[in-house]
Image: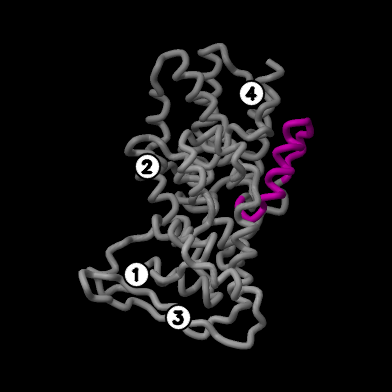
Amino acid sequence: DTVKLKKISAEEDDYILPIMQDVNDIFLLTFLFYEKISAKFMIHMVLEDIYPSRLRELFKAKEKAEDHEYLKEEYLKKVISSKKSMKNVEFYFGTLREFTKKEFSKSKAPDQYLSLTEKIFKNISIDKGLIMNLLIEKIRESFRGEGYYNLIVLKAQVILNFLLALELIKNTMEVNDLSEISIKNNLSEKIEKFFKENDGTFYNAQAKSSFLLGVLTKNLLNIQYNERGSNPFIKRLKNLTMNERDIKSLYPQIINKLEEYDSNYYQQLEEIISAYLTLSGTNWKISVDEINYYFVLGLTLYKLDIFKLQKEEK
């Protein structure tokens, strides 16, 4: 496509659009999306009447989306081995393309990528359910395949951050205002601070419970691998298709396994999870896609500094 936004499309040969964002709305921009097939050009979409001020909003949203500890080089070094891959954990429209179906030239149906891109440029609301499904399906593909999912999870999160920053997706279900737990210690304060800084993602106790269970699960998987050289417990994650009942049943199973290995260093975290599970109630309103997305995000962000305390004390 021809949307070559420097630092948004990762193209280095086009520098005009970053300049355009600083221009007043005295003219309009037109974007042409095309596919080159042999010597022919097939036009797929034309975006007209885009103001420079909209570009300014996109660049600001990108900056906000990437301004998180878990997207900084220091953290990426802990969970991604390739330096080349680390550079890709930013918001580009090409990143969004990775999570959508790519066969637009073979179908009459509107291409997901082009449809989403149009909505982003024109400030049109996007269905959150669709986005969560696109993100988790790509993650499931990696999880089932080579088992290496950290990079794709972080790419998914920067997309989510970007859309939340633009307020194009919203949490349609009621936010649980009582999602702060009564347990107060050094760990809970750090965790609640993290949740507040990322309140668009972790907007209720159900999302928080799923995420923290992911963190605890990853610690168990690491311990199990060190003990046995394998991760049989990973089969209980059902390839990231767990429902409310499944995710809640993990909690006692994880604790039992940690006790078996005489490696239960995480009592404070377990107390916090228990408190959030209590707050989350029954008949969860968040979808299976969301449950598993927050869970695998916990599997990926388990090395954040906020989770270091207990193991170091042990």
Residue 129 visible here: no
Task: Name the residue located 68 percent from the left edge and 46 percent from the top edge.
Answer: 195
What residue is drawn where x is 47% and y is 84%? 48
Q: Give the residue pinned by disc 3.
A: 47
Residue 255 against residue 213 in the figure, above or below: above
Upstream in sequence: badge 4 or badge 1: 1
- Give the distance between the C-alpha atoms of the residues marked 1 and 3, in whole angstroms: 14 Å
Q: Give the label, 2 or 3, closer to the camera.
A: 3
The reply to whether discs 1 and 3 touch (Cβ–Cβ < 8 Å) is no
Element marked by disc 2: helix
Q: Quadrant of the N terminus?
A: bottom left
Where's residue 137, x and y in %?
Answer: 38, 50
Residue 239 quadrant: top left
The reply to whether residue 282 is visible in this rendering is yes
Q: Which residue is mark 1?
A: 111
Q: Earlier in the sequence, mark 1 or mark 2?
A: 1
Going from N to C along the chain, the mark reached first, 1 or 3, is 3
**3D distance between C-alphas at marks 3 and 4:** 52 Å
Q: Which residue is mark 2?
A: 142
Badge 3 amino acid:
Leu
133 versus 184 height, above or below: below
